[in-house]
Image (cartoon, grey):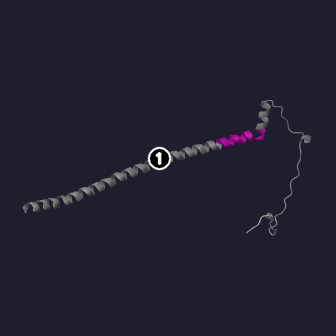
């Protein structure tokens, strides 16, 4: 019977040690997870800053290209470029122009009845 008491005492002695070991693993896992999460937050913050800088660069480049396009489309610049290339372009003569009358705008009547398509009479409806 002494043997059963010894084995029972050994189980009782290892129980708190196993519980303490499990608690240490849980705390260590939480600490590692916390450090990993902070690293991910730092990395994502850095990526956001890089993307914002790239967005600002692209926005500035877009503004510059918009200004350049407006300059190239200006009548003065087009005339100057046509003269440089000797295209032989000149302003249109009044006889070369066709003037179209402005279409009149009919005021919309809110009380007007709407006209809908009519069903063919040869089709039977249930």
Which segment is the magenta one? Answer: 64-76
Q: Could you tell me which residue is drawn at 47 percent across and 49 percent down?
A: 45
Q: Quadrant of residue 18?
A: bottom left
Of residues 117 and 100, the one nearer the viewer is: 117
When the figure is inspected, residue 106 is found, relative to residue 71, above or below; the finding is below
| x and y percentages locating residue 7 in the rendered image | 13, 59
Q: Quadrant of the C terminus?
A: bottom right
- The magenta stretch spans residue 69: yes
Q: Quadrant of the N terminus?
A: bottom left
Q: Could you tell me which residue is drawn at 66 percent across and 41 percent down?
A: 65
Residue 97 is left or right of residue 38, and the answer is right
Pick out the residue farthest to the left.
2
Q: Secondary structure at mark 1?
A: helix
When the figure is inspected, residue 91 is found, relative to residue 32, above or below; the finding is above
Figure label count: 1
- The magenta stretch spans residue 109: no
Q: Quadrant of residue 114?
A: bottom right
Of residues 5 and 124, the one nearer the viewer is: 124
Magenta segment main secondary structure: helix
Q: Could you tell me which residue is drawn at 16 percent across and 60 percent down?
A: 11
Q: Which residue is mark 1?
A: 46
Pick out the residue farthest to the right.
95
The crowding category of the residue bearing disc 1, from other C-alpha atoms within 10 Å (few below 14, some 14 to 19, many at least 20), is few
| x and y percentages locating residue 52 in the rendered image | 54, 47
| x and y percentages locating residue 120 in the rendered image | 80, 63
């Amino acid at each position: 019977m002494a043997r059963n008491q010894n084995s029972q005492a050994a189980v009782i002695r290892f129980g708190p040690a196993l519980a303490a070991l499990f608690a240490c693993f849980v705390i260590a896992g939480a600490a590692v997870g916390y450090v990993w999460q902070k690293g991910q937050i730092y990395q994502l913050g850095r990526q956001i800053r890089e993307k914002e800088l790239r967005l600002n660069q692209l926005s500035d480049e877009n503004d510059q290209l918009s200004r350049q396009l407006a300059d190239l489309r200006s009548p003065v610049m087009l005339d100057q470029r046509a003269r440089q290339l000797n295209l032989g372009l000149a302003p249109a003569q009044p006889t070369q122009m066709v003037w179209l009358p402005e279409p009149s705008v009919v005021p919309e009547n809110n009380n007007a009845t709407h006209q809908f398509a009519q069903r063919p009479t040869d089709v039977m409806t249930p």
